[in-house]
Image (cartoon, helix red, strand yellow):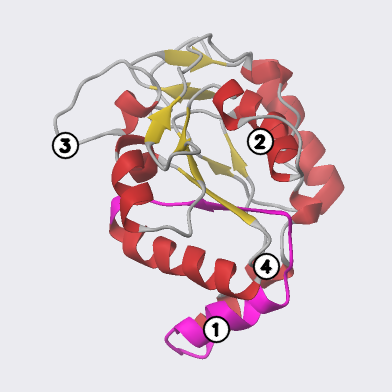
Amino acid sequence: DIALRQRRQIISEADFRDVIARKSATLFGISSKIVSASRAMRIAEIIKELHPGSRVVMGGVHPTFSAAQILRKCPAVDAVMRGEADHAIVPLWRWAAGGGELADIPGVTFRDQAGEIVSSEKDLTQIDLDELPYAAYELVARETDPLVPRILTARGCTLRCVFCASAALFGYKFNSRHATRVVDQIEATRDQFGVEFVCMGDLTFMAHKPT
């Protein structure tokens, strides 16, 4: 992506196809916003074409609120994860590898054996953000260099602005981390990857003044 933009070249479907052809996997995850939904579904189709035995799952803002629509429109998408899915990632991979059922994973929308679109209930238990492991940036594809880590001090927002779906994505709640844990992550990321710049990626960075 970076190399193509530096050459001022438009990223084409052939570019996607070339990268996907070289990256076989058991499970492919695609995140999408509304503006990228059509492209995301096309990428899912390319994945299924090149790796027919793989599983394709979508997540993110648009899939969360349009899960059934995506599954009806794009047969290449096997399932949609709704909202925060940290605790569902491992069970999801086990399912993709041949163990477990989608119906047992919280917050997933999928097709049942009869082809009907069904959804499992969403576990609304608040995630302890300080318990989550740091992002494994060593696994990120090198096409994305230079690395700009995204650090969160909190997730969510309690407001209900009519122009924004982000608060609804997190259930209209604000989930804050301990400030010392945020600093620990920044320092660990700097030491491991040698970065001099991080992105504070909160929706509402100034919402919790003590932090």
Whether pointer 3 and pointer 1 mark residues with C-beta atoms closer than 8 Å, the reply is: no
Mark 4 vs 1, N-terminal side: 1
Whether pointer 3 and pointer 2 mark residues with C-beta atoms closer than 8 Å, the reply is: no
- Residue linked to disc 4: 145
- Res. 152 image quadrant: top right
Mark 3 vs 2, N-terminal side: 2
As drawn, 34 above or below 201: below
Task: Give the residue at x 48% y 53%.
Answer: 77
- Residue linked to disc 2: 92
Any mark on residue 15, and which? 1
- Residue linked to disc 3: 163
> Disc 4 marks which amino acid?
Asp
Q: Between marks 2 and 1, how big is the CA–CA gap?
A: 28 Å
User: Is 111 or 176 nearer to us in this picture?
Assistant: 111
Packing grade of label 2 (10 A; few <14, some 14-19, many >=20) is many
Asked whether, in this view, residue 17 is left or right of residue 26, the answer is left
